[in-house]
Image (spheres, helix red, strand yellow):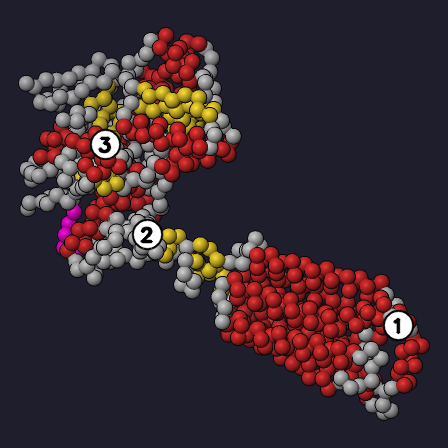
Amino acid sequence: MEEIVQCTEPCCWWVNPKHALSFLIGKNICSGLLRTVGAVSFCLQEHDFPFLKGGVFPQYNVPQIFSHYRILPQNYHQFLALMFAVTEVNKDLVLLPNITLGFDIYENHQIERRIILYSLSLLSTQGRMIPGYKCDRQNALLSVIGGDSPNSSRKMDSHFLQLGVGFEFSQGERRVYPSFLRINPKEFPQYVGLVQLFLYFQWNWIGLIAPENDDGERFISSLVPMLNEKEICLAFTQIIKIDFHVAKGSDRQRIFNTWSKGEVIVLFGDSKTIAHVHTVVYLYESQRKESFLKVWIFVSNWKLTVRNPKYILQTIKPFHGALHFRDDAREVSEFSRFLMSLDPLNPQGDRFLPLWWEKVFGCHLHKPGKTPPKGKTTCTGKENMQNLPSYVFEASMTGESYNIYNAVYAVVHALHAMHGSREQSMISPFCYAMKCKVLISDAASCDPCPEDQYPNKNKVQCIDKKLHFLAYQDPLGYALVSLTLSLSVITLAVLAVFLKHRDTPIVKANNRDLTYLLLVSLLLCFLCSFLFIGQPGKLSCLFQQSAFAILFSLAVSSVLAKTVMVVLAFMATKPGNKARKLLGKPLTNSIVLACPLIQTILCATWLLTSPPFPNLDFYSLIGEAILECNEGSALMFYAVLAYLGFLAFISFTVAFMARKLPDSFNEAKFITFSMLVFCSVWITFLPTYLSTKGKYMLAVEIFSILASGAGLLACIFLPKCYIILLRPDLNQRENIIRKSCNV
């Protein structure tokens, strides 16, 4: 028997989609929502639709303080994600060529027995509604995207392919429903995040509230042991029945006495659960004229949206601020552009769009040529979704919509694999829009792990590769840092000795300015080793090789200048030799400026043309990703090293030729030996550097820098420090003159 259901106060209608698309055009619709299992709900202020007959439409008596809530407000967003994914697949020339996808939407009217009816209708091709498509041929059912409640999925046949996006079955239920595949993120990581949040803020008195259903019981049973393990005190756990009837005053007092025990209250459940708690808190505070100040934490399956942004403060006021966990969603840039392209004046078959548009933007759409109603703002169709508050509508992919998007592509890739050969379809059906870590053993084909992962021993799971670089905490890095600091301290000590004894003959005889310059350049060479240690970044990669090359060029050019001065000083003693004119600061300054300047030009060219940059090498080491600095241009890198080697060879050659020249302190001999050590280190460096990978390659270069610098420091300066500190009798002008005369 047909009946008409009327509202005596604000109520919610759960409307058949066919009727919704055909009839719902009234002006009093306050919100249009869509559930993933085709929920289309419209909240009406008056009984303006007497033509809605022939069905059982349950009436909900909602308290006035609930009038600003919208049940599951993200549903239309999920509908758009579904439509976007289907449209995107149909435009793809590679996926499912010559196959067009469509979709149906069904609503269970909050009556679970209707699921059976819809399950049967899914097997039929009569009376199908596919927005945007006209199908004259029989359509084949691929799969069903389930709703956010496990009850609806349980009612469907266990062999019906379902993709769940809003809940998870227990381990035992997964065996009963083998054709149910879950797309949404697991709840357990969220519980781990809750515990970490409690530990971080040192919250130690926690209350848990959950609805009386399987999800609520699983939440309590999963979180309580984790709290006990971390020695976090549990103030109370409460399982509540969701009922719109407001509890009696005595019951509210008892509830509040329980809730008052907790420092932090974690609320698990959907929007109905939150609304129930909101009602109790609101009524309690209204009667007691005092605030219930607690820290509230909502889990990810709760979504709050108000039908009008101006009511948001009134809606959340009883909670006095709250923390909310959200599902993760990757950015899908095309989806944002898809949303921006929606036009309510040309909805292209989406009859929900004009209704939704009028409500969220507070305007009225009317046909061209007709006069708009008085007092109504006319919609231009150019209103920007990005200007809407996020609690009204998000202009990007949300966690729930991302689950829908993944579900569509999971089905598409599975169907694509069925139509193609196994060799051509190497993509796992469920790995298109998300990372898959667990693979199936004994499969007909093996899916390769992503480049940043590697398979475990049994080849059934992909494991993230560890970052590999020379860290300060690494034993090798710690040893190199200690060696660098030690050599830097020794260099500073030698510089201090020469500064303190700067007026002594041995310091004067070795050209004080060149000595100071050489010591400072060696100190900077040692310190530039720190650019090679630690996690590579843009700046460290950009300057580490250039700084090393320029500083060592300065050090070697200082040694070359000292050697040239020794040779010229001996030649100037011969009568009539013109070398005396070359002695002095102009020559030494020219050498120490010109040689590093050439190296600086080479490095500047390198940085301007092909600068080094941080790079991840996934293939050189098993189970590790090498984070390294790519030279950018190998040619420029070896050109810089070649020039440095050229300077060292010239210095060694000049010093070797002057090793037998008379010198009071054997300066040429010491320089010869120091350059021999320097050249030996860098000749050994090249084959060793090319045969190593990762942090060991950097360790070889750092050790070469330290060893060559230490060779210069020890061979040139330690003999002089020995005379200055331990044999001051040799550091006398008379001794120098006597030794020179003997020579």
The image shows residue 445 at horizontal and vertical percentages of 23, 58
**Mark earlier in primary sequence (1, 3):** 3
Tell me if residue 718 comes above or below residue 234 in the rendering.
below
* Residue hosting label 2: 461
State the residue at coordinates (68%, 74%): 556
State the residue at coordinates (33%, 32%): 301
The image shows residue 580 at horizontal and vertical percentages of 83, 84
Determine which of the numbered discs, if any, sits on residue 150 in the image: 3
Is 318 displayed left or right of 87 in the figure? right
Is 450 displayed left or right of 469 in the figure? left
- Residue 3 visible at all: yes
Locate the N terminus by quadrant: top left
State the residue at coordinates (41%, 32%): 226
The image shows residue 638 at horizontal and vertical percentages of 54, 74
Specify the quadrant of the image occupied by residue 194: top left
Toward the viewer: 383 or 137? 137
Tell me if residue 377 comes above or below residue 652 in the rendering.
above
Is 539 displayed left or right of 102 in the figure? right
- Residue 342 visible at all: no
Residue 639 located within the stretch drawn in magenta: no
**Mark earlier in primary sequence (2, 3):** 3
Determine which of the numbered discs, if any, sits on residue 731 in the image: 1
Toward the viewer: 78 or 430? 430
**Mark earlier in primary sequence (1, 2):** 2
Query: Which amino acid lies under the numbered mark 2 shown in the image of this protein?
Result: Gln
Mark 3 closeness class: few <14, some 14–19, many ≥20 residues within 10 Å? some
Specify the quadrant of the image occupied by residue 520: bottom right
